[in-house]
Amino acid sequence: MKQKNDSSKLTSRDLQAIERRAQILESAKELFALNGYHATTTREITKHIGMADGLIYHYFPEGKMQILNTILNDFLDERYLRIETDIASIKEDVPIREMLIDLGNIFFTYIAKDKNVLMILLREKNIFAKSYTEKFGRHMKILTEQTMKALEQRAIKNEIRSMDFFMMTNQFWSAIYSYIVQDILFQQYKMYAVDKETYLEEIVDYTLLTWKIS
């Protein structure tokens, strides 16, 4: 659900409703990630933020599933659209190493910082609505095509080898996803001994070695 952007036209009741709705979503997001969707009740969601039990159905008449779908769709609509926009704005004349680092940083900026949603994505994938999985697939296709096109342009300029651009794209993004997943699931074990900035530079440098023209 899209919110009004011009706050000057909103009444105090409107602003309170927007705030309460956001509080419910944040509470649910935290509890779904921590305990799981099925193990979290609507009462726990409202209790977590000191809200009356029945009020949740005023904002989400269909209950938990509507809340889950809202969390996931907001994540896609906001984050992935920003990713696609930022990738499209990367200049074609920047050095390829800088381009790949920009790609990685865009993904870390918009995706990695919301660990609760990512945990939900990992643990609750079997109950997602079909419309969500289809939308997610469309966004991933756009992201893949954007990256493939950028790599193909670099190959035409002889900056990298001309190979299977889909596999090259998959190679790069898989390395980024790998760091994000370990940071969510195994953060305490420090599977990667470096921070994400250092990791990104190391991945980019190694990737470019494998793509280097002989």
Image (cartoon, rainbow, N blue to C red):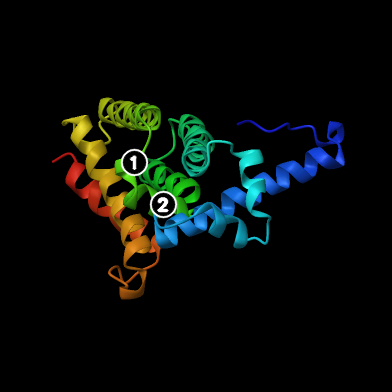
Residue visible at 83% across and 34% down? 10
* Residue 195 in which image quadrant: bottom left
Residue visible at 86% across and 37% down? 11
Task: Evaluate whether residue 115 shows in this view.
Answer: no
Mark 2: secondary structure: loop
User: Residue 87, relative to residue 52: is it above or below?
Assistant: above
Question: Which residue, given by chain and number where applicable, does mark 1 sit on?
Answer: 127
Residue 61 location (% of width, % of height): 58, 36
Quadrant into which the C terminus falls: top left
Give the camera-side residue of 67 and 93.
Answer: 67
Task: Evaluate whether residue 23 shows in this view.
Answer: yes
Residue visible at 21% across and 49% down? 209
Q: Type of residue at label 1?
A: Ile
Give the camera-side residue of 142 and 128.
Answer: 128
Compare marks 2 and 1 and give the one earlier in the sequence.
2
The outermost residue toward the front is: 54
Give the camera-side residue of 123 and 211.
Answer: 123
Question: Which residue, given by chain and number where applicable, does mark 2 sit on?
Answer: 37
User: Residue 1, relative to residue 42: is it above or below?
Assistant: above
